[in-house]
Structure formats: C-alpha cells, structure tokens
Amino acid sequence: MDTATHVAVDRPRPQLRAVEEAQSLKVSVVYGLSESGRKASLLTGGDGRARQQLSIQVPPTRMHLVAVDPAGVARLKLQPRYELTESERVVRHEGPPVYDAPPSIDDLYRDAARNHELERLFFAQRQAWRGQRREADRERRVTAAREFLANPAHRAMVHPAPTPKRCFVQTASGRVMFDVTSDLGMAKELPLEAYRRFRNDLHARRQQNLTLRAEQERLHEQKKAAADAWVADHGTADQRSRAAAGLLALDEVVASMTVDAFRAAADIPFYERDGVARLQEHLRNVTGDMDLVVALADLDVSSTDASSATAEQWQLVSRLQAKFPDAQVKVREHRLMSRRHPTMAPLVLFGILVTRRVGPFSLRREFAAPGR
C-alpha cells in the first residue's frame, strides 16, 4: 500500500490578524479645504468646512508618519507643513495643508510621507546653517580679539566691569561677550588682557585723582594764607578778631577783597542781578498787561560774550581798562526770557565783566553797560 503524503498549506490565522489590528494606531488627521475644496465637499455630502478633522487607523508599517504630542494625542504628520523652494531650501509653515478637493486616505499618506522626508531635510539644513553661523561667529570673535590685543588703546566695556574670565567688547557689529570657558584661541586670551587694562586704568585714575586733590588742597592752603594776610593788613577789627578765633568765613574775606580790588571803579554802577523784576517790567510793556507776573522759576538767563559793542559800551571798556590795566575786560550779553512766555521777545542786557588776579584769587566784578 502506498503511503499518503499530506502537504501543509499556510492559512491566515484569525489570531495573527487580531494582533495586527491591535497594533494599528488610531490617528487624528487635520487638513484644510480651499473654497473649491469646500464646494466639492458639499457636493459629495461633506460638511464643507474649511478645517477638516477625521480619525484613521494607521498600520505599523506607516507608524513613522505619526507624531504624538506631550498630551498623548497621535496625529498624522501633516502639520507643521514643509515645502521645498526653487533654491532647494526647505521652509516651514505652521498651518495644515490646504486641498482644492477632499483628499483620499492615500493622498494623506503620500503627503505625510513627503512631509516626513522634508522635515528631516529641514532639520539637516538648519543644523548646517547653525554650524555655518557658529563658524562665522567664531571668525568674527577671533577678528575682534586680534584687533583688541593688537591695539593697546582698546578697552572693554566698563558696565558690566571686566573680570579675569569674562568681559564685553563693543565691536562694529555690536556688543560681544568673551568668556574663557567657551572661547578658543585669541578670543580666550582677551578677557584677561581686558581685565589687566581695566585695572591699570583704575590705578592711573586713582593716582590722577590723588594728585588733583593734593593740588586743590595746596591751592586752598594758599588761599587761606593769602586771606589771613589780607585780613591782617586791610581787615576791620571785627574781622581780625573773628579770624583769630577761626570763625571768619573765607567767602566773606573774598567779598571784602573784591570790594577793595575794584574800589577805583566805585563810581561805575554794578550789573544788578534783578532779572525777574526787569523781565516782568519788559513783558508788561510789550504786552500791555499790567497784571503779568514773572516768578523766579520762570526766569531763563543765557549769558555769552558779546559779538559786538556799541560806542558807549566800548568807551566804558576803555575806561575800565585804564583803571585796571592788569585785568581782563569783556563785554557780556545776557538774554532774559520767561519759560511761561516762550514766544515773547527776550530782554537783552549788557555788562562789562572785569577779572583781576590777586594772589591765588580770581576776583570778578561786572559793571552795568549801556544798551538794551
């Protein structure tokens, strides 16, 4: 008897199909419809809305086309949307794709696959661009560091103050921070050199201030000695007694010295600092308003050397020069205005400023000059 041979035939097992179905993922799909697409949606029984959302089952073989957000929501990779430009550059758009006709499931898979590939290219291009930018930034930093180290006059910004490890330098392209922990080459050497220059500048400025202070103290002592000598020779009995007790103010002595230094011109009137009253009278005459008031806070005075002088003013200058040949004589112009009446014409007054050097003191007296 012949032996019967049985051939095993593979048949799909219900259990395997159930496993595959269990491994598929329910995914949300969001896309947009243009006006043409919305019309087509209505004609085919759709809702015709601009924003369409549906759910599909994605098999394991296409799981790379699915993205899951932190909230656990799975979406088909249609948003953000990536496009390839004519210059072979991938650009990113945050909105979903827009169709002129309701897409099929295959259309959605195809666009998601293309979007997936462009996404990878987009990040690759961005990584390359970041690398180029880092390289350009490194070259810029090296160039700035080379220029800084080669020029001893260059300084780092003082706010914030340089430290041995970090500093800020103002360059043609803006403020740049240099840090020894992240920079390389010459850029790494810059913070320590900038800090050394900063400390040297502080030391030099401190020495300059000490020298200036010593000079000021020496001049003050000279003025005190000159004031004491003048009080001893020309002061009143009251001033001498107060000076002996150390209670005579230096300003009072200077005022007395000024009166004595310009005694020869006692017959010439002084320039009075009564600008408020004069300006108020001037504005009342101009406007005809006798109730107009100018307060002290309204007064604005600008004083300059006069650019010209009248015959009467020059005559007074010559007279003062004859009385005080060792003095400096100038014609001064004072423009008085009211801040509350800025459109009104200013009141212009003139004075003759005489400055005499008496020992360490510069004594000044201004005399009234004709002309308005």
Image (cartoon, helix red, strand yellow):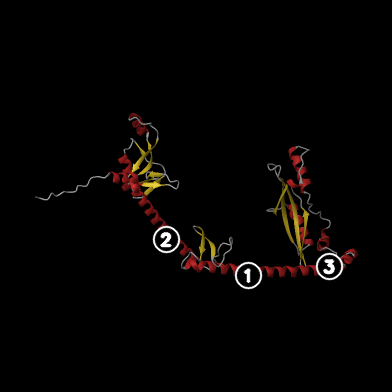
What's under tag 1, amino acid-wise? His
Q: Tag count in the figure?
A: 3
The disc, 3 or 1, on the residue closer to the chain's N-terminal end is 1
- Tell which tag, 1 or 2, sits nearer the viewer: 2
What's under tag 3, amino acid-wise? Trp
- Farthest residue in the left direction? 1
Question: Would residue 295 be seen by someone viewing this image from the given angle?
Answer: yes
In the structure shown, which secondary structural element does the residue marked by tag 1 occupy? helix
Question: Would you place residue 64 above or below residue 194 in this image?
Answer: above
Q: Are marks 2 and 3 in contact (CB under 8 Å)?
A: no
Q: Quadrant of residue 250?
A: bottom right
What residue does disc 3 label? Answer: 230
The residue lying toward the viewer, choosing from 155 and 44, is: 44
Q: Which mark is residue 203?
A: 1
What residue does disc 2 label? Answer: 135
Give x and y (percent) for residue 156: 55, 63
What's under tag 2, amino acid-wise? Glu
In the structure shown, which secondary structural element does the residue marked by tag 3 occupy? helix
Question: Would residue 87 be seen by someone viewing this image from the given angle?
Answer: no
Q: Are marks 3 and 1 in contact (CB under 8 Å)?
A: no
Q: CA distance from mark 3 to mark 1?
A: 40 Å
Give x and y (percent) for residue 227: 82, 67
Q: Crowding near pointer 3: few (<14 within 10 Å), some, many (20+)? A: some
The residue lying toward the viewer, choosing from 135 and 68, is: 68
* 62 displayed left or right of 287: left
Q: Which mark is residue 58?
A: none
Q: Quadrant of residue 319?
A: bottom right
